[in-house]
Image (spheres, rainbow, N blue to C red):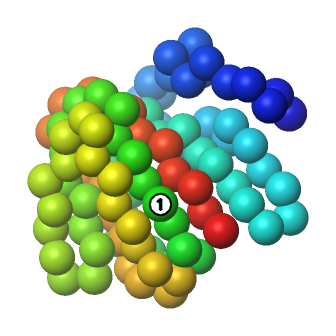
């Protein structure tokens, strides 16, 4: 895996959402999330996740809370907390799962 990554070069949208793994080790996974308008990741529990919005807008669901996300925002979902994402247009984020 690369240690220096140009995220803009990795952005790719698909009719079916598929995360692009930027980095993975035994304890860490860094997926790039590229969602088309209307695509979503249904709420699900996972490890500690730190999410950063690069471009676009959407809604981040954390437990029963809905958070409007915009470029430059970072959201933290603790270990085991249900989280999901809905896009309002093309949305690009990355996450760090620990």
Residue extending furthest toward the top: 9
Residue extending furthest toward the bottom: 80
Q: In this rendering, is residue 44 above or below 88? A: below
Q: Is residue 14 left or right of residue 26?
A: left
Q: In this rendering, is residue 30 above or below 98? A: above
Which residue is nearer to you in this view: 3 or 49? 3
Secondary structure type for disc 1: strand
Location of residue 53 (image quadrant)? top left
Quadrant into which the N terminus falls? top right
* Residue 25 location (% of width, % of height): 84, 56
Location of residue 63 (image quadrant)? bottom left
* Residue 32 location (% of width, % of height): 54, 39
Residue 19 appears in the picture as rendered:
yes
* Residue 31 location (% of width, % of height): 59, 46
Q: Is residue 49 left or right of residue 97?
A: left
* Residue 52 location (% of width, % of height): 40, 46
Which residue is nearer to you in this view: 69 or 89? 69
Residue 18 appears in the picture as rendered:
no
Number of residue marks: 1
Q: Which residue is mark 1?
A: 50
Q: In this rendering, is residue 24 above or below 8? A: below
Determine the residue positioned at 41% across, 73% down.
Answer: 77
Q: Is residue 88 left or right of residue 2?
A: left
Quadrant into which the C terminus falls? bottom right
Determine the residue positioned at 25% across, 59% down.
Answer: 60
Residues packed near mark 1 inside 10 Å, few (<14), some (14 to 19) or many (20 plus): some
Q: Is residue 52 left or right of residue 88?
A: right
Determine the residue positioned at 69% across, 55% down.
Answer: 29
Q: In this rendering, is residue 49 above or below 10? A: below
């Amino acid at each position: 895996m690369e240690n220096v990554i140009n995220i803009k070069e990795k952005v790719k949208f698909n009719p079916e959402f598929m995360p692009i793994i930027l980095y993975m080790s035994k304890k860490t996974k860094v997926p790039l999330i590229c969602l088309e308008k209307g695509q979503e990741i249904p709420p699900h529990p996972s490890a500690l996740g730190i999410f950063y919005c690069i471009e676009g807008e959407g809604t981040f669901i954390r437990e029963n809370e809905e958070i409007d996300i915009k470029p430059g925002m970072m959201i933290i979902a603790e270990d085991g907390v249900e989280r999901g994402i809905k896009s309002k247009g093309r949305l690009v984020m990355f996450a760090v799962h620990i």
